[in-house]
Image: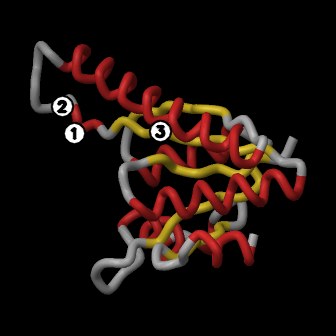
């Protein structure tokens, strides 16, 4: 089954990307894969408690996923899949796309603050967009719910 990949974080633009992915998945009979990434700096500086911090980061991702999963099932009838990886964000996104051949499209949310769309969008689109193994859809962070529904 073709899947849309969305990278989960705490940003408001993630919600836009997730909404877009859920609506597109429902309309096209596709799936949604949510990628939670544990950054190395989350536990690197605390030798001796690194495993505890890693476990807490994993728990936090799983709890957030439960909330988003419930919303997707209730609102769009789409049951997402969770994948958790550890490492640098852009590298882990590329690794997941390369390892999961069902991932057909990467959906990212663009930030609204500052002069660029955000670090992940910049890394993946501006620097490596021509070498991506799948198309990338960038959902503007300033889009409201109605606009996302209209273009999905």
Q: Earlier in the sequence, mark 2 or mark 3?
A: 3
Q: Quadrant of the C terminus?
A: bottom right
- How far apart marks 3 and 1 lie (CA) works out to 15 Å
Q: Is residue 133 left or right of residue 61?
A: right
- How far apart marks 2 and 3 lie (CA) works out to 18 Å
**In this figure, which residue is indicated by the disc labeled 1?**
41
- Closer to us: 152 or 76: 76
Decide: few, some or many residues near mark 1? Use Cα within 10 Å; few <14, some 14-19, many ≥20.
few
Residue occupying the point 28% across, 81% down: 114
**In this figure, which residue is indicated by the disc labeled 3?**
36
Query: Secondary structure under badge 3?
Result: strand
Q: Earlier in the sequence, mark 3 or mark 1?
A: 3
Pinpoint residue 76: horizontal percent, then vertical percent.
75, 48
In the depicted structure, whether residue 150 falls above or below residue 27: below
Decide: few, some or many residues near mark 2? Use Cα within 10 Å; few <14, some 14-19, many ≥20.
some
**In this figure, which residue is indicated by the disc labeled 2?**
44
Residue occupying the point 48% across, 57% down: 14
Q: Check whether the beta carbons of the residues at disc 2 and disc 3 lie within 8 A of each other.
A: no
Q: Is residue 76 left or right of residue 46?
A: right
Residue occupying the point 47% across, 73% down: 141
Pinpoint residue 57: horizontal percent, then vertical percent.
32, 28
Q: Quadrant of residue 55?
A: top left
């Amino acid at each position: 089954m073709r899947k849309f990949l969305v990278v989960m974080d705490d940003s408001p633009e993630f919600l836009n990307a997730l909404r877009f992915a859920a609506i597109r998945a429902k309309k096209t009979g596709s799936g949604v894969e949510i990628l939670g990434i544990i950054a190395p700096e989350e536990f690197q500086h605390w030798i001796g408690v690194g495993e505890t911090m890693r476990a807490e980061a994993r728990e936090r991702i799983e709890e957030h996923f439960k909330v988003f999963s419930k919303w997707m099932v209730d609102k769009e009838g789409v049951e997402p899949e969770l994948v958790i990886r550890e490492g640098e964000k852009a590298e882990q996104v590329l690794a997941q796309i390369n390892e999961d051949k069902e991932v057909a499209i990467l959906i990212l949310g663009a930030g609204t603050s500052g002069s660029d769309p955000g670090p992940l969008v910049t890394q993946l689109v501006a620097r490596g967009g021509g070498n991506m193994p799948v198309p990338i859809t960038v959902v503007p962070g300033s889009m409201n719910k109605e606009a996302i529904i209209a273009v999905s």
